Image (cartoon, rainbow, N blue to C red):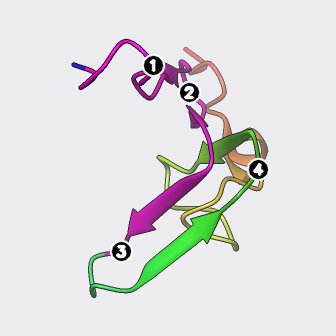
Amino acid sequence: MPNSPADRPCRISVQRRGPLLVEGPVEVELEDGTIVASDRFRVALCTCRRSRRYPWCDTSHRDRERKPSQA
């Protein structure tokens, strides 16, 4: 909840088989405690861990979509 009417909550959009879209600017704390920041108005956070720019999404999830199983 916002602390005052002027404060807006951070909005995160969940994408099926895609990244989390976060309204920025943001700071992300990685597992090792390192903090990475972006001052962009919207950032895409990788959820598949295939990105070469992790934690930022580079659309690597598109390269490895599952193909329908063949019977």
Of the pair 53 and 12, the residue shown nearer to us: 12
Whichever of labels 3 and 1 marks the residue nearer the N terminus, that label is: 1
Q: Is residue 32 magenta?
A: no
For marks 2 and 3, give the CA distance.
21 Å
Residue 8 vertical placement versus 22 (above, below): above
The residue stretch that appears in magenta: 2-30
Marks 4/1: CA–CA distance: 20 Å
Q: Which amino acid does label 2 sit on?
A: Arg
- Quadrant placement of the C terminus: top right
Work out whether mark 3 precedes mark 4 in sequence or the reverse, and give the earlier one.
3
Between disc 1 and disc 2, whose residue precedes?
1
User: Depth check: 27 or 58 in front?
Assistant: 27
Q: Say few, some or many: other residues with alpha carbon within 10 Å of mark 3 (under 14 / 14 to 19 / 20 or more).
A: few
At a point 41% along the width and 24% down the height, the residue shown is 7
Give coordinates of residue 58: x percent, y percent: 77, 56
In this picture, is 21 found above or below 71? Answer: below
Query: Seen in the image, is 28 located left or right of residue 40?
Result: left
Residue, disc 2: 17
